[in-house]
Amino acid sequence: MLIALALAAVTAGYSERGVGTIRGWLAEPTPATSPQSTYTVPGAIRLPAVQYATDGGVCHGTAVTPDAQIVVTDPSGATIAYVPLGAGTLVDGACVLPFTLVVPAGKGSYGIDFPQYGLMPYTEQEIADLLDLTIG
């Protein structure tokens, strides 16, 4: 009886923090998925020398236009976020076009469409775990 009460108290304590079950308490924590939750993912597209040109110390892609965007879709294919590429800088012989994605949580899976590289699938956990997303 005492063990059952202690277990109920532990479970109730974790329920207040959004875990809700003993299985959740023992498993790795997962990010909150309320409608206001987002993931912020910094990244860049790295273009090799044959794919960029320079202009006054700034580089830009020859096939990736200056108004190119990274587009994020949900499982149904609807656009849920997009961001333009930043100004290119030369780093180790490559043109680096930075971006910062702000992706809403709770979609389960995502498609991220990169200019010149196409649509790439990601799970929610992969998005949550990303510290930097560099393509190229």
Image (cartoon, rainbow, N blue to C red):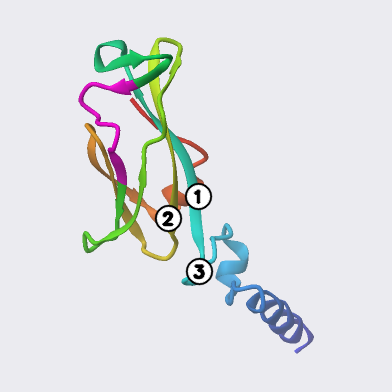
Q: If you read the primary sequence from the N terminus, does the residue marked by circle 2 or circle 1 appear first?
A: 1
- In three-dimensional space, the C-alpha distance between marks 1 and 3, rounded to whole angstroms, equals 13 Å
Taking the magenta stretch, the answer to whether it contains residue 61 is yes
* Residue count near mark 2 (Cα–Cα under 10 Å), binned few <14, some 14–19, many ≥20: many
The residue at the far front in this view is: 56
- Residue plotted at (21% across, 59% down): 77
SS majority, magenta: loop
Q: If you read the primary sequence from the N terminus, does the residue marked by circle 3 or circle 2 appear first?
A: 3
Disc 2 element: strand
Disc 3 element: loop
Magenta region, residue range: 60-70
Viewer-proximal residue among 108 and 56: 56
Which of the image's four quarters has the C terminus? Answer: top left
Q: Is residue 69 left or right of residue 89?
A: left
Q: Is residue 132 above or below residue 51?
A: below
- In three-dimensional space, the C-alpha distance between marks 3 and 2, rounded to whole angstroms, equals 10 Å
- Label 1 sits on what residue type? Thr
- In three-dimensional space, the C-alpha distance between marks 2 and 1, rounded to whole angstroms, equals 6 Å
- Residue plotted at (41% across, 34% down): 86
Taking the magenta stretch, the answer to whether it contains residue 95 is no
* Residue count near mark 1 (Cα–Cα under 10 Å), binned few <14, some 14–19, many ≥20: some
* Residue count near mark 3 (Cα–Cα under 10 Å), binned few <14, some 14–19, many ≥20: few
Picture coordinates of residue 54, whole percent (x, y): 34, 14
Q: Are marks 2 and 1 in contact (CB under 8 Å)?
A: yes
Which residue is identified by label 1? Answer: 40
Which residue is identified by label 2? Answer: 103
- Label 2 sits on what residue type? Val
Viewer-proximal residue among 3 and 33: 33
Which of the image's four quarters has the N terminus? Answer: bottom right
Which residue is identified by label 3? Answer: 36
